[in-house]
Image (cartoon, rainbow, N blue to C red):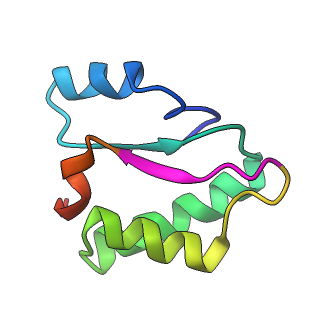
Amino acid sequence: MGCESLTNTKMAEAFIEKGAKAYIGWTGLVSADHTDAATQQLLKHLIVEKKTMATAITETLTEVGKDPTYESTMSYYPSQAGEYRP
């Protein structure tokens, strides 16, 4: 959940090749405070509420928004992973 972790897909592809079902990251720079708040909400939606990846990210971004300093947003890879539930 660090800066630019999904600016390109190289790292995400490496995780998928090692067996990950999906990869979530930021499309640009993100402040530490913002990523901490967003990650906490995201994990609640994914693990506690058992929501799909797409729904969890959408709800997280609605609640905490894009990073106000850098305007980075959260996304996932691969594109078909949106309906995945951990």
In the rendered view, would you say 17 is above or below 50?
Answer: above
**Residue 10 picture quarter:** top left
- Taking the image as shown, residue 54 lies to the left or right of residue 62, namely left
Residue 64 location (% of width, % of height): 65, 72
**Residue 7 picture quarter:** top right
Q: Which sits in the foreground, 38 or 82?
A: 82
- Taking the image as shown, residue 6 lies to the left or right of residue 17, namely right
Q: Residue visible at 43% across and 65% down?
A: 57
Q: Residue visible at 38% across and 70% down?
A: 56
Residue 30 location (% of width, % of height): 72, 44
**Residue 19 picture quarter:** top left
Q: Which sits in the foreground, 80 or 38?
A: 80
Residue 15 location (% of width, % of height): 28, 26
Q: Quadrant of the C terminus?
A: bottom left
Q: Residue visible at 29% across and 23% down?
A: 13
Q: Quadrant of the N terminus?
A: top right
In the rendered view, would you say 22 is above or below 58?
Answer: above
- Taking the image as shown, residue 60 lies to the left or right of residue 70, namely left
| Magenta span contains residue 79 | no
Write down the region rendered in magenta. Answer: 70-76
Q: How many marks?
A: 0
Residue 25 location (% of width, % of height): 48, 42
- Taking the image as shown, residue 43 lies to the left or right of residue 74, namely left
